[in-house]
Image (tube, rainbow, N blue to C red):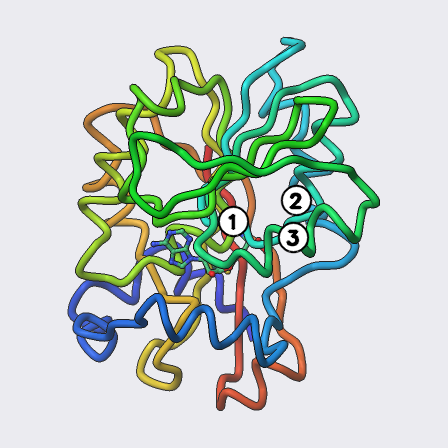
Amino acid sequence: MDHSADASGLLEASDVGSQKDRVVTEEEWLEKWEMGNIGFHKEEGHPLLQKYLDVLLNGRSGLRIFFPLCGKAVEMKWLADMGHSIVGVEISEQAVKEFFSEHSLPYCEEPVPEISGAKMFQSTSGNISLYCCSIYDLSSSIVGKFDGVWDRGALVAVNPCDRQRYASLMISLVEKNSSYLLVTVSYDPNKHKGPPFYVPESEIKSLFGNCCEIRCLEKVDDFSERHRQWGLDYFLEVLYL
Ligand code: SAH
């Protein structure tokens, strides 16, 4: 069955009512990491980043690239190995430590003076800095601005009530000529409570449309057994620039 119409907006704001009020707390995320309940993690990295790497880099080298809600995304290592400078933010210290240990990267950790309780973990080589705190604690005065963003499992993991705040923060963290690759998911939100949450295209336009041009680059079928267990019968990933 062709479900591409769903991803292009037939399921609109009225259909996401079932997810609107859902809140996943920081404690619940920490627990997911403790329990190893991290089906979102892609050991092999994300094929859409591989495919659209040139779009993200746009011929530029030595970029500062931001990974919001980074988990232990292996794409951070890929891009660092290409000479870019990576900054991520993640509330789970376990995730951050697993990232460094799984890639055998030595690191140091230090407090972040501007954010109470936060720590910054930095690879000894200096090109990967992961902030362990809530993304809402960051600002451009702390982390600077970025030339590129890889937003996968981030906007779709943000509680629906926080999306506006998240989008405004992200807009404040990017340089004028930056490239922002956003991966969202499309499925029937009446059948699964999320996360990941379904974010309709109309909402992406209302969140980011005033500040950037938005283009849908690709929709791919990502349906798997995990999604079948959630009670779904289709699951698409949608990539925007
Ligand atoms: N982007 C990663 C992880 C996606 S899952 C990937 O592609 O694999 C979402 C992640 O966001 C989880 O690891 C969770 O611990 C983290 N997270 C949730 N709320 C957060 C917040 N407010 N600030 C920082 N990290 C958060």
Question: In terms of secondary structure, where does tag 3 sit?
Answer: helix
- Calculate the distance from the C-alpha at mark 3 to the C-alpha at mark 2: 25 Å
In front: label 1 or label 2: 1
Q: Amino acid at mark 3?
A: Lys
Q: Are marks 3 and 2 in contact (CB under 8 Å)?
A: no
Residue reaching furthest to the right: 104
Q: Are marks 1 and 2 in contact (CB under 8 Å)?
A: yes
Residue count near mark 1 (Cα–Cα under 10 Å), binned few <14, some 14–19, many ≥20 = many
Q: Where is residue 38, by image quadrant?
A: bottom right
Specify whether 182 is left or right of 162: right
**Residue that badge 1 annotates:** 152
In front: label 3 or label 1: 3
Q: Nearer the viewer, residue 121 or 72?
A: 121
**Residue that badge 2 annotates:** 48
Q: Is mark 1 within 8 Å of ligand 1?
A: yes
**Vertically, is 222 above or below 200?**
below
Residue 160, image x and y in percent? 24, 62
- Calculate the distance from the C-alpha at mark 3 to the C-alpha at mark 1: 20 Å
Residue at the spot x=56%, y=70% of the render? Answer: 33
Q: Is mark 3 within 8 Å of ligand 1?
A: no
Residue at the spot x=52%, y=49% of the render? Answer: 152
Residue at the spot x=48%, y=17% of the render? Answer: 147
**Vertically, is 29 above or below 177?**
below
The quadrant of the rendering that contains the N terminus is bottom right
**Residue that badge 3 annotates:** 97
Could you tell which of marks 3 and 1 lies nearer the N-terminus?
3
